[in-house]
Image (cartoon, rainbow, N blue to C red):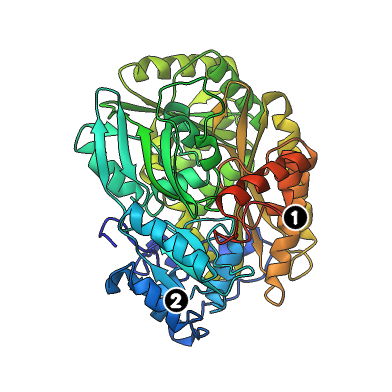
Amino acid sequence: MSQEHPAMRWNGWGKSAHHDPALENDAVWNWLARELGMPNLIATPARELGDVVLTPARLDAAALKALAAILASEQLRQDDMARILHARGRSYPDLLYLRAGDLSCAPDAVVFPKSTGEVLALLKWAEAHDVAIVPFGGGTSVVGGVSAQRGRHHAIVSLDLSAMDAVLNVDSVSELARIQAGISGPALEKALAARGLTLGHFPQSFEYSTLGGWIAHRGAGQQSNGYGRAEDWLQSALLVTPHGLLQTEDFPASAAGPRLKDLILGSEGIFGVIAEASVRIRPRPREQHTASFLFRNFVDGLGAIRLAVQSGIETSMLRLSDAEETRFFRAFRKAGQPTQLVDRLIEKYLAARGLGPRSCALIALFEGPEGKRSRQRLAALARSCGGVDVGRGPAKSWLAGRFHSPYLRDPMLDHGVGVDTLETATSWSNLERLYGAVSSALNQAICAHVPREGARGIVMCHLSHTYPDGASLYFTFIFPRMLENELEQWQAIKTAASRAIVAHGGTISHHHGVGEDHREYMADEKGLLGIEVLRAVKTALDPHGILNPGKLIPD
């Protein structure tokens, strides 16, 4: 594993040495307790690594002997640490299991292939020895996409692609790059930056996630307005299946039937292992501009964004927080700090312009030589919709901490607080209706599943990705945990929100993917015939079902 492909700590997000001094202030947690209607928060530390006991590996001598003929000894690991690090991703249920020290689903071994040929040999070996294979990139899935499920197979092996992290070719004339799928976000951007180029894909998981994972989960980076989603920048891919190699078409356009790359986008490792990809790259922008606005309410902000997108104002990101998210994060950052004179002056200034405590913040990013002009156009449009320009500061602050939010989950869990996210997308005409339905479902479900009378949750939302015909909604919900049945508590909340999404015209996932958590809603979205089509593809490429059991396709 290269230094630029870091592993996260075994039971949380980021390195174990990471800490945020602001979260060491007791006043922050006292404030959060009041927000949740709790007299105090309960310390719930995670189990220590030394408490974890793994079941013995199931690979027999014959399987290991055959495996030794494919890989060098350093490419096969069966030690406890390797198995623990590849047992689960980072969904809320994953974290509950990891923190409890429940590693019952740990793989029986972890393999680190260095070439496409080795991946193909490993899949054929797995078929011959009845071993399930879980393709593993950065392990950042928040929907149970990499949990090590054996299914009906004898054993399970995690196939870690971190040794396949090379930039194979850069065609600057065509603005294409051929890259191995195991490369991490930071390593990819560093390699391209040396040539003055960028892919521009910056998901919140950027520090740890990989190119193959972005494609397999059909991801969208924070700047997808400017750079597109995975389906926009993916030109072609090489998929390794138990039956051989599937190289998708590599033309700029073609009318020769359906494009096979669409079978790989969002396939989540159930059809094959993504080994390489050709991606569209761009010159690295020399200029970046930011802007921040406040609107009286969420609906006004949505209207402004729709007009901006449909009128062709070029942005790399538009992010609108609802009133609760705007309020919460401002208060969270200031919890335990004395009120400053400047804060009172700002509030007085905003109140004079009709912006009270329910105002909603919009931050925007612009890149390239036209960025300044686009900022001016957006500012004029925002004013016409009742928005107030509050300068570049909030957007710059967000940009500096754009990858920090996942680090809040572990300290909250340490204090007996649950936090999770979900996302969806729909048309502009349906957006307000869907927002109201999901917000209501989350609030009601949390209030029905709290550890004491009077306790409550915090439900907030932002719009994060936009299109001419619609946009995404990204919900964050925080709640006091019911420690005696916390998995059931989460499942009740998640189910209520998911059913609201399906019933009110939203997709079950905009960019997180399906994994285990959303699998039961796939038939609602794809239809029964659509599910049969996916099963047929699965049967054709993986007839023995060894690839990532229990994901994507419902039983």
Tell me where residue 306 appears, x and y as whole percent. Answer: 60, 21
Which residue type does callout 1 highlight?
Thr
Sequence-first disc among 1 and 2: 2
Please name which of the two marks, 1 or 2, marks the residue nearer to the observer. Answer: 2
Q: Is residue 187 above or below residue 516?
A: above
**Which numbered disc covers residue 63?**
2
Which residue type does callout 2 highlight?
Ala
Q: Residue placed farthest to the left in the image?
A: 194
Q: Please say whether residue 366 is visible from this viewpoint.
A: yes
Quadrant showing the N terminus: bottom left
- For the image, the number of numbered tags is 2
Q: Disc 1 marks which residue?
A: 495
Determine the residue positioned at 79% across, 67% down.
Answer: 453
Q: Is residue 333 above or below residue 288?
A: below
Tell me where residue 204 appears, x and y as whole percent. Answer: 45, 47
Marks 2 and 1: in contact by CB < 8 Å?
no
Query: How many C-alpha atoms fall within 10 Å of the one at disc 2: few (<14), some, or many (≥20)?
Result: some
